[in-house]
Amino acid sequence: MTTKRKTYLNQMLQQIPQGTVVTSVWLRSLGISNDLQQYYKNNEWLQSIGTGAFSRYGDTPTIRGAVYALQKQLGSDVHFGAKSALMLHGFNHFVQLEGFQWFLFSSNKVLQPKWFVEYFKNKRYQWVKSDFLPAELGITDVHDVFSVQVSTPERAILEMLYLAPNIISLKETFQTLELLVNLRPKLMQELLENCSSVKVKRLFLYMAEKINHSWFTEIQVDKINIGSGKRIITKNGKLDKKYNIVIEDFGEI
């Protein structure tokens, strides 16, 4: 039994990057029963971080390592989005780091694990549940020791607009879009055509037209359904008749 336990343990440890979480579900898929999991815990090879979740003994899981476990071990469609995605793509130079928090996006049906909530309760993050974009569209892998799924810059800017103006300011979002000079118009077009948020689409087109990057000339605005009726983005703003939104002038934001 001892040899069998050590074999299971060696197989498991080889697959656990530092800083990540190990879920009970994944351990059982490797043939490591609940009893063996308890044995590893009692012998200080694993440490519990909450119901159904462990880490290597002495290790400190990060949010990135926890999301890795959700994606790779549990098959969850949660991903890093908005400003978090841009940072993970290496755009640190224009993502505002003061008061930085992680933004995690998932569909409405995804449940946030209790162990995740409890373990990271003192960390700065927001878990956003929404189906305003298709789950698989504009998602890519970013690798650094281990891979996690994140939004492409094209999807990330739409996620920032989804959170604007209450969670992320319009000014920060506009300034971010100004610096995204290499967005891919084909992917941007597909995202906009499949976006269900009228607010997001109108804000994006309004801002992108003002900035007028070269990629914007390839966006086929007539194929994007921006709905009907007026949308009030900011109180005491001015009506932009083209996109039918009430918004402050960007010189005043």
Image: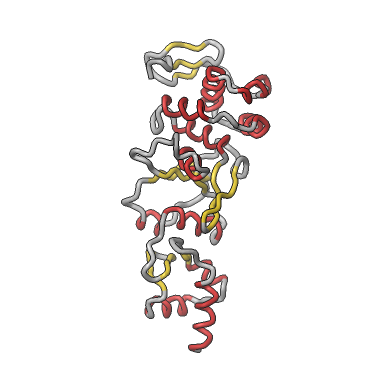
Residue drawn where x is 61% and y is 40% of the image: 138
Determine the residue located farthest toward the front in the rendered image. 93
User: Which percent across, then down, holds residue 145?
Assistant: 51, 58
Residue drawn where x is 52% and y is 76% of the image: 32
Residue drawn where x is 54% and y is 59% of the image: 74
Query: Who is closer to the viewer here, 229 or 186?
Result: 186
User: Which percent across, then down, holds residue 25?
Assistant: 51, 67
Q: Where does the C terminus fall, quadrant-wise?
A: top left
Q: Is residue 2 above or below residue 144?
A: below
Q: Is residue 160 above or below residue 129?
A: above
Query: Who is closer to the viewer here, 180 or 66?
Result: 180
| Colouring method of the image | secondary structure
Q: Is residue 115 above or below residue 167?
A: below
Query: Who is closer to the viewer here, 86 or 200?
Result: 86
Determine the residue located farthest toward the left in the rendered image. 122
User: Which percent across, then down, holds residue 17?
Assistant: 49, 64
User: Which percent across, then down, holds residue 204?
Assistant: 54, 25
The quadrant in which residue 43 appears is bottom left
Q: How many marks?
A: 0
Q: Is residue 175 above or below residue 93?
A: above
Could you tell whether 222 is left or right of 199 in the image? right
Could you tell whether 119 is left or right of 78 in the image? left
Residue drawn where x is 47% and y is 65% of the image: 22
